[in-house]
């Protein structure tokens, strides 16, 4: 397939061509940020998984590196699946899943955990003793994958996702040397509503609490919640390294858009917990396959803990380096009806703040990338405090609407990143985010601000043309 550039993103991580899914091996190593990803280098569809690789000094400008892992050995003959990376005394060590399909039709797999090391951060050697964990514990099954490893005190710890029957689980191991692993038990598991398989776990401390992120398959949709068959979310609570007991509350969705999955994090030398997700979802339509590529990663987001013990996600501050040209549309101004901003830009960050105490309208909103054709609409209904992202006309069709409650009494603040085929919305300093791929034609441009039934008061409306890091 010849590459068509119409939807190629301007400031997101993508492979040079062909398929990608999960982010893997997020790490800061020798001062640089490394991101690996599930990749099929020879086809725009999922297939034998390799690890693609990019690195960056600032989380904004990324450089492509050679493929880090290729499935060459028997224990990984059907793919080097997702995993993580650690810095083991200067040795960059990847911990990943070797996948073998036993019976693809019946969904029977034989998965094991493997390692590969590098001293230059580019070329990796697989451990002769692979797999380092060859057999799942009795609480799991052959679906046993996506190791996330971190250091605590004298030990390395690992979480893995697994399933037993129709129960998704996260299980825990520890090790002195990354090679010999001791099984510690089940860290958390599903009840009937939380999915039959938990993928891509990550477990870390955040402002004194412990957070378990995972991506369950087969969640039951409830109203505005869990509208994807695959949906990343988290449990938050207290963890005790002595007893390995994790006491937590109920499952919370991380993002409320269509395309945010297999989220992983890293801790950097500034103490920031930074998350990146796959900016697609298994069941999403993926029109870029016609163009010779498919899949991208989200912007890096800093995680912090909110007042109600919930995760807040905000774009890392370095993303302001992308800003090229600033346009102040208005400050401290009331309007009603529609207000059109004509712009030729397709890479945009915008900031829009409404003073709700001076707003009489029933709802306020934005249309982007096309006004009456192929537009993506963001709408906030003031009385019921619902924020809706509507991508029905911009590529999502019947499943185009996503909605979440955002409690804002005084100010509604929206920070929106628009790329050629994506939108990421950050609401009220990270209280909620909505991430979706959108596919308007290249000529669909412009931004329209609107109110329904009354005036709205804008505190500030500014947008920036953003830089294309790949061109
Ligand atoms: C999640 C996932 C992982 C697996 C990988 C395979 O999207 O299914 O569980 O390791 O993708 O590409």
Image: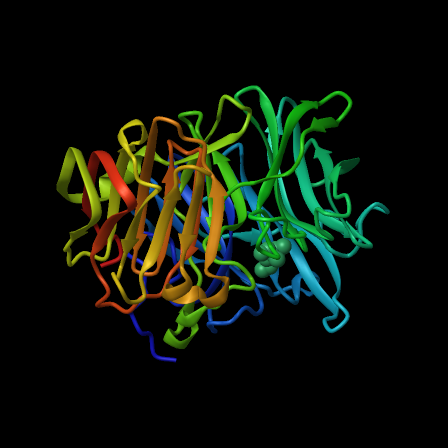
Horizontal side of residue 11 vs 303, given as left or right: left
Q: Quadrant of ligand 1?
A: bottom right
Residue 64 rendering spot, x and y as whole percentages: 36, 55
Q: Residue at x 69, y 65 (%)?
A: 74
- Compared to 320, does 13 lie above or below? below
Residue appearing at x 75%, y 27% in the figure: 244
Question: Residue 439 occupies which quadrant of the picture?
Answer: bottom left
- Left or right relative to 125: residue 99: right
- Residue 130 in view, yes or no: no
Rendered image quadrant of residue 326: top left
Identity of the residue furthest to the front in this view = 453
Q: Is residue 207 above or below residue 115?
A: above
Q: Is 327 placed left or right of 80 in the picture?
A: left
Q: Quadrant of the N terminus?
A: bottom left
Q: Residue 329 versus residue 278: which sits nearer the camera?
A: 329
Residue at 59% across, 64% down: 71
């Amino acid at each position: 397939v010849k590459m068509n550039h119409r939807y190629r993103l301007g400031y997101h991580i993508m492979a040079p061509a062909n398929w990608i899914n999960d982010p893997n091996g997020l790490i800061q190593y020798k001062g640089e940020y490394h991101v690996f990803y599930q990749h099929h280098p020879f086809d725009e569809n999922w297939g034998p998984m390799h690890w693609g690789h990019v690195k960056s000094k600032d989380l904004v400008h990324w450089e492509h590196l050679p493929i880090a892992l290729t499935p060459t050995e028997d224990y990984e003959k059907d793919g080097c699946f997702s995993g993580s990376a650690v810095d083991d005394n200067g040795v960059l060590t990847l911990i990943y899943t070797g996948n073998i399909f036993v019976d693809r039709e019946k969904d029977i797999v034989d998965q094991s955990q493997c390692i590969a090391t590098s001293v230059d951060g580019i070329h990796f050697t697989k451990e002769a003793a692979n797999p380092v964990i060859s057999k799942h514990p009795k609480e799991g099954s052959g679906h046993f994958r996506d190791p996330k490893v971190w250091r605590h005190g004298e030990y390395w710890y690992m979480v893995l996702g697994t399933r037993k029957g129709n129960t998704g689980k996260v299980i825990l191991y520890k090790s002195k040397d990354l090679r010999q692993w001791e099984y510690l038990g089940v860290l958390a598991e599903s009840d009937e509503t939380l999915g039959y398989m938990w993928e891509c776990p990550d477990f870390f401390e955040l402002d004194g609490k412990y957070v378990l992120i995972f991506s369950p398959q087969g969640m039951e949709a409830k109203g505005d919640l869990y509208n994807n068959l695959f949906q990343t979310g988290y449990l938050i609570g207290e963890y005790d390294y002595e007893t390995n007991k994790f006491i937590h509350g109920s499952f919370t969705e991380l993002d409320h858009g269509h395309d945010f999955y297999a989220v992983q994090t890293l801790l950097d030398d500034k103490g920031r917990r930074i998350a990146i997700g796959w900016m697609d979802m298994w069941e999403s339509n993926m029109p870029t396959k016609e163009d010779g590529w498919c899949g991208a990663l989200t912007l890096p987001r800093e995680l912090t803990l909110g007042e109600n013990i919930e995760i807040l996600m905000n774009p890392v501050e370095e993303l302001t380096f992308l800003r090229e040209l600033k346009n102040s549309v208005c400050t401290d101004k009331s309007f009603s009806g529609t207000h059109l901003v004509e712009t030729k830009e397709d890479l945009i960050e915008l900031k829009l703040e409404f003073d709700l105490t001076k707003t009489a309208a029933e709802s306020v909103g934005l249309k982007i990338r096309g006004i009456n054709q192929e537009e993506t609409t963001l709408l906030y209904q003031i009385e019921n405090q619902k924020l809706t992202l509507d991508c029905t006309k911009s590529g999502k069709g019947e499943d185009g609407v996503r909605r979440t409650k955002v409690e804002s009494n005084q100010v509604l603040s929206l920070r929106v990143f628009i790329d050629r085929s994506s939108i990421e919305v950050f609401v009220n300093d990270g209280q909620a985010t909505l991430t979706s791929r959108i596919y308007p034609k290249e000529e669909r441009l412009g931004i329209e601000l609107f109110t329904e039934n009354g005036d709205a008061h804008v505190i500030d409306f500014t947008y920036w043309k953003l830089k294309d890091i790949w061109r």
